[in-house]
Image: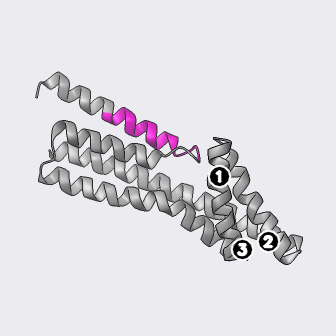
Amino acid sequence: MEPWLNISIFGITMLVMLVGLVGLVIPIFPGIVVIWLAALGYGLLVGFNTVGIVFFVIITVLMLVGVTIDNVLMGVGARQGGASWLSIGLGLLAGIVGTLLLPPIGGLIAAPLAVFLVEYLRMGDWAKVIEAVRGLAKGWGLSFLVRFGIGLLMFVLWGFWVWLR
């Protein structure tokens, strides 16, 4: 492969991965998936040798963990705050629908609102309702930190892949 093409592929891949990493700050931007797609594109363009396959498999596993951890940690946080499984499930559903109907902030509003309403109807105790929503928010904050760490690790692993190729 021509050196200029190799440098171009490296530069574009790195730029897309950095966009994915920075995009993790935006709650609905699929930064983890963007980083994974950049790694896939890189592998398809330069070829998957044994080292590339190993690194890509690890990056893929991290991507799968990263896209599911959000919901898991938000649910765990809400549950620790006293929310019922019903309100957690409806909050998740409301978050998805809200994101689709009113991007980019619809899901951020709909999920806690759904948990709030379901818990208020279920318990009628404002203090417990607020605690459940606070738990959801804490879980979301923790999930952001975990997703950002996973995205950064994916980026570093890709760097080792490039270096060892």
Find out whether residue 25 is within the magenta segment.
yes
Name the front one of labels 3 and 2.
2
Report whether 120 appears left or right of 55: right
Three-letter code for the amino acid on which mark 2 is drawn? Glu
Q: CA distance from mark 1 to mark 3?
A: 23 Å
Q: CA distance from mark 3 to mark 2?
A: 11 Å
Magenta span dominant secondary structure = helix
Report whether 127 appears left or right of 106: right
From the top left corner, tell me how far across and down residue 88 is, in percent: 67, 69
* Secondary structure state at the residue bearing disc 3: loop
Q: Furthest residue to the top?
A: 4
Q: CA distance from mark 1 to mark 2?
A: 19 Å
Q: Which of the two residues, 159 or 84, is positioned nearer the viewer here? A: 84
The colour scheme used to paint the residues is: one colour
Residue at which label 2 appears: 119
Question: Total marks drawn?
Answer: 3
Residue at which label 1 appears: 97
State yes or no: discs 3 and 2 in contact (Cβ < 8 Å).
Answer: no
Find out whether residue 48 is within the magenta segment.
no
